Amino acid sequence: MPGTRGPVPVPVTTNGGDQDLTLQILHAVGQQPDIQTSDTFPNAPSTDIKAALDRLSSRSMIEYEQHTAEEIALTAEGRQIADEGSHEFKVWDAVRQQGRLSLKDPALASKSAKIGQGKAFALKWVKKDGENLVPIADAAEDSTRQVLIHVQQHKMFPDPKQLKDFQKRQLVATQKVITYSARKGPRWALEIPVEVTDLTAEMLADGSWKTANFKPYNFQALGEPQMAGSLHPLGKVREEFRKILFNMGFTEMPTGRFVDTGFWNFDALFVPQQHPARDLQDTFYVSDPPSAGPPGPDPVADAALTEMEASSFTVDPSKNTNNAASTPQPLNYEQYSANIKQVHQDGAFGSIGYRYPYADAETRRLVLRTHTTAVSAYCLHRLAANPRPCKYFSIDRVFRNESVDATHLAEFHQVEGVLADYDLTLGGLQAFMAKFFGAMGLTDLKFKPAYNPYTEPSMEIFAYHHGLKKLVEIGNSGMFRPEMLLAMGLPEGLRCYGFGLSLERPTMIKYGIKNIRELLGHKVDLGFIESNAAVRLDRE
Ligand code: PHE
């Protein structure tokens, strides 16, 4: 009948069958206040007992507890000795029966007979007489066998000191045994009643619900595993970073464009056109189409950023207190491109430049962006329409043509931030980095001078890794160069910090992943994605 649970329709088997055992337990607890299953059902397998106990206790027909104990059991050799006598006894017995036994007799050839011989000598039961063994003792007490028989019966050692010796001789071993003690429960009966699991319209109509035996809810039962979607560990760590950065007043930059031009990825960042990073080794160039038009506005990105800024108190232009600059100026991309060309080729804005012939074609080449700093450059140039302090961040994918190994793929994610404000100093950048990494529990940062074409000074950031017990590089940072900022049309006093780090490294550390291919790409185990817990960057 649907909606009920009755006696399980398993045929009652005679010999220790599961169903049989269930009824036997009911009887046993009815006859005795407390039963030990190991005594009452010494031959039933422990799993069958447990299944029967669970079936009954879920119906409150019995109550039971589980006990684990250590028991001493005989090994195969121990059992043989308990049955047939010890090796030494067998040697003595054979010698006694024959009166004398040649040392070459096949009865003395086995390994156990050799052991027995030695022991029988030591016990002064037999001795050598020329090439023969002769008995000394008339009677021998086989104490090894007696001890083993005792252990077999009581599962305990009479003298605990002997235990070690017998274990060493591999005659006995300890094993874990699970036993249960059980007694009547509040609904004990000699028959398993039918239990109702669903309240139906019929039961309400005919009133049978009043007397029905409802199955109690089992609040301990684990539900069916749900085939739900799950977040990728990188996604979870990204959310943590976003939260930290939003809490610090940052606005998220639109990073939807994986393909960008050489202009935004390199030229705008004062990366010279002969820079090794632009070599085919590091940059993926797009072949179809190979290039785009001149730099210009990206309406999609602009709309996204405007929306983001509107929800942020700190950078919404309408909430800007710095009134002098609050009327937006139109952005002039031709002027900006010309400024960049000039600062590279001839020098400008107080810089002597690189002084090489700047190729416009190079600025239009399409690349898979090698860093999200391409997006930061776009957003900082946009800021020049209405220069004001701002904090922007992005977390998205970048691509580098690197050889793939355990910790490198040809693509990864960058966490990047830029902060613009008047009269910023390097000490402020260090203090900011300490605050940012401090939010993830990383303290005692160390800074090392580094080089980026677009920042001066530049610093690599290190933190002590307690697991690896050494300083590990956790990020790259610097103050954007005037060649970059002044060419955009930003005012002299407005300085800008930038920093970047990979999302993969902290994720691998947090989830204890050694090989990046287990985290990203076609070799990722979906079970790993589904079973991993959420992450808190500031907790161990
Ligand atoms: N673009 C740098 C990188 O690829 C990170 C960075 C961003 C450094 C901004 C300084 C300023 O590692």
Image (tube, rainbow, N blue to C red):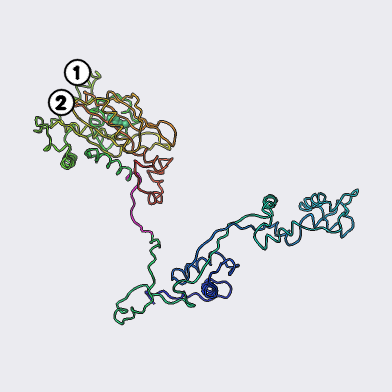
Where does the image place residue 141, in percent across and percent down from the top left? 79, 58
Which mark, residue 262? none
Local SS, label 1? loop
Side (left or right) of 118 relative to 457: right
Where does the image place residue 514, in percent across and percent down from the top left? 43, 40
Where is the C terminus found, in terms of image quarters? top left
| Segment tinted magenta in the rendering | 225-235
Residue 148 or residue 128, whichever sits in front: 148
Q: Residue at x 29, y 44 (%)?
A: 239
- Main SS, magenta region, reads loop
Which corner quadrant of the image does residue 510 belong to? top left
Q: For the residue marked with disc 1, what is the amino acid?
A: Gly
The residue tagged 1 is: 350
Local SS, label 2? loop
Q: Respond yes or no on whether mark 2 lies under 8 Å from ligand 1.
A: no
Side (left or right) of 168 relative to 321: right
Side (left or right) of 148 relative to 415: right
**Disc 2: CA contacts within 10 A as few (<14), some (14-19) or many (>=20):** some
Q: Respond yes or no on whether mark 1 lies under 8 Å from ligand 1.
A: no
Q: For the residue marked with disc 2, what is the amino acid?
A: Pro
Please tell me which of labels 2 and 1 falls first in the chain: 1
The answer, for residue 506, to whether it is visible in the render is yes
Which corner quadrant of the image does residue 70 belong to? bottom right
**Residue 234 lies in the magenta-colored region:** yes
Q: Residue at x 38, y 61 (%)?
A: 224
Ligand 1 found in image quarter: top left
Cα distance in 3D space between marks 2 and 1: 14 Å
Residue 144 or residue 87, whichever sits in front: 144
Which corner quadrant of the image does residue 431 belong to? top left
The residue tagged 2 is: 491
